[in-house]
Image (cartoon, helix red, strand yellow):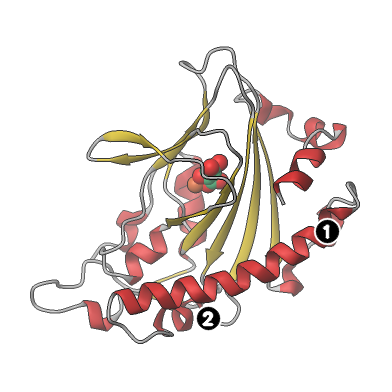
Amino acid sequence: MLKEWKSLKDMELILSQQKASRLTGLIAYFLTFIPEDRRKHKFWPENPKSFRKVLEEYTSRMQILTELVSKAMAKSLNLEADCFLNQFGERAALQARFNYYSRCQRPDLVLGLKAHADGSGYTIILQDDVEGLQIIKDERWITAPSISDALLVLMGDQMEIMTNGIFKSPVHRVLTSSEKERISVAVFYTPEPNKEIGPEEGLVNEERPKIYKKVKDYAGVHWEYYQQGKRALHVAKV
Ligand SMILES: O=C(O)CCC(=O)C(=O)O
Ligand SMILES: [Fe+2]
């Protein structure tokens, strides 16, 4: 998938569409691929020829993966295996953001992607071998290792809500490099529109009261705040 994205991102069309964001050294390309009836095929690149086919394959693997990961997370918290999948709903979305960070002469001044938390349930990231993704922990930025062919699963705000704050949605950012360009594909797995999600009852007790309330269409609220460079999670706080 990274190979297809690499050969695509050189295309003049996309570069010109994205002039504004080139200032920050980032070119991003966003596609919804699940549910299938939400696909806007006219935006799906035709070149390289293999792009659509590889994206189809990547999609079906991501579907298998989200099922496995959602069940594994539930089991790790001693919950019913399907509980998160039920919250995500049958029409949960899978959306890909293809990121390209060009080389930058002043990495000390220019970020590839500003600090943010994802509004998804969780996000599955495929990176090339150039590091750059950083996650904040105890007020320090920690660089995520880039392991060839490994996928990185990053919690989004909605998993933090569903786990009543047990799994944290980390603030993260991407640095630029003066030596190497970097590419990544982030797949956002997000609960279906119009569906209420909230803390799993099994994770709420006297010692750990509910810290989040039920929310609906959180991704939209998150987007409003994101554009202003702010976090949105407080809107779900009890
Ligand atoms: O490029 C990356 O590794 C992370 C991208 C990211 O955080 C995002 O697209 O939300
Ligand atoms: Fe992100």
Task: Determine the residue located farthest toward the left in the rendered image.
Answer: 207
The image shows residue 54, relative to residue 135, as above or below, that is below
Spatial CA span between label 1 and label 2: 26 Å
Foreground of the two, 205 or 179? 179
Instruction: Specify few, some or many for label 2: CA neighbours under 10 Å numbering under 14, 14-19, or 20 or more.
Output: some
- Per the rendering, the mark at residue 3 is none
Of the image marks 1 and 2, the number of the one nearer the N terminus: 1
Give residue 207's quadrant in the image.
bottom left
Amino acid type shown at disc 1: Arg
Q: Residue 73 appears in which quarter of the rendering?
A: bottom left
Q: Is residue 88 left or right of residue 73?
A: right
Q: Identify the amino acid type marked 2.
A: Gly
Mark 1 C-beta to ligand 1 under 8 Å: no
Label 1 secondary element: helix
Mark 2 secondary-structure assignment: loop
Residue position marked by numbered label 1 in the rendering: 52
Is residue 236 visible in the rendered image? The answer is yes
Q: Is residue 229 visible?
A: no
Picture layout, residue 211 above or below residue 133: below
Residue at point 54%, 64% (across, down): 189
Identify the residue under disc 2. Answer: 89
- Vertical relation: 229 (above or below) 217: above
